[in-house]
Structure formats: C-alpha cells, structure tokens
Image: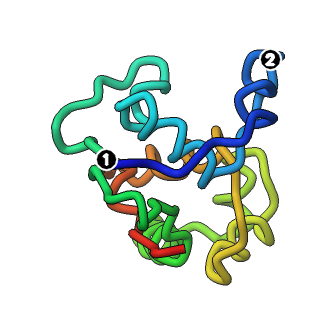
Amino acid sequence: MGHRPIAVGTVAGLTKGKRMIEGDSALQVCLWLGEPPESFVPGVVAGAEHALPLLPSHQILRWDLRRLYDGLDRRRIEKGVTWRDLAASFGTTSSVLRHLKEGSRSALPALMDWILWLDRPAVEFTRVSSR
C-alpha cells in the first residue's frame, strides 16, 4: 500500500503556520500520518468510521466535492435556509459553496467545517482516483 508524494512546499507551509491547505493535499498528509481529517479538529473524537482507506500506489484519494455539494444542498433545504444564509454561517460566500458542484478545489479547514455541519465522516466525501 502506498500514497502519493507530498510536495515539500505543502509540508513546509504547515510548519510556517499556514492556516489553510489544499484539500487533496490534506488527504495525502492524512494518509501519510495514518489519521483521518477529523483527528485534526479540536473537540472531535475520530473513530473507526472515520478511517481513510489504504490504497495501492497507482490510486489516490481525492475529495468528492460534488457529493459534498449534494449533501450541503439536501441539509440546506431541510433547514429551510438559502445558499446565502448558509454561506454566511460559515463566513464565506454562496458562490464558494455552489462551486463545489463543479468540483472546484477547496481547502481545509473550510472543508471540515462543512462536513462537520453535515455530521458525517469526512471519508464519505472522498473518492478513489487513478490519477
């Protein structure tokens, strides 16, 4: 089992107090450390349901942002809030959330804020890719 190489700049940025990390890079760091993303969220206890899959070296774990968008949209409708209101509660804009539908890249910690709001394990919003 393997994982994809992590760019030196990604790791160096974390050591310099960088507050954000690109989502797919964060997944690679999590795999490298053997910890799910929830392990790095204060107050969250990660259990077996949060474990990330071990993958062969020809595969990579990526965020499934379309699935995340769909989850946010369902919960948003259930709660009767607009995209604007939902975005404001996260301190962002509605266009940032709507761009998830297109699979745009996103970063942590915002991704985890959205996933925690859904009260689901982060691994449910990942996909395995061969590239």
Question: Is 53 located above or below residue 71 in the figure?
Answer: above
Q: Mark 1 highlights which residue? A: 52
Q: Residues within 10 Å of mark 2 (few under 14, many from 20)?
A: few
Q: Three-letter amino acid code at disc 1?
A: Leu
Left or right, residue 95 beside residue 6: right
Residue 83 drawn at (x, y percent): 67, 70
How far across and how far down the image is residue 23, in percent? 63, 51
Q: Say above or below: 61 vs 30.
A: below
Q: Position of residue 37 (x, y in %)?
A: 45, 37
- Disc 1 crowd, CA 10 A, few/some/many (<14, 14-19, 20+): many
The CA distance from mark 1 to mark 2 is 25 Å
Place residue 45 in its image quadrant: top left
Task: Please tell me whether mark 2 sits on a helix, a strand or a loop.
Answer: loop
Q: Quadrant of residue 101?
A: bottom right
Q: Nearer the viewer, residue 94 or 27?
A: 27
27 or 41, which is in the foreground?
A: 27
Element carrying mark 1: loop
Q: Residue at the location (41% across, 34% down)?
A: 38
Give coordinates of residue 112: x percent, y percent: 53, 43
Q: In the picture shown, does residue 46 fall above or below 1? A: above
Q: Amino acid at mark 2?
A: Gly
Report the front residue among 110 and 130: 130
Q: Which residue is mark 2?
A: 17
- Residue at 70% x, 49% y is 22
Tally of numbered discs: 2
- Do the CB atoms of the residues marked 1 and 2 lie less than 8 Å apart? no
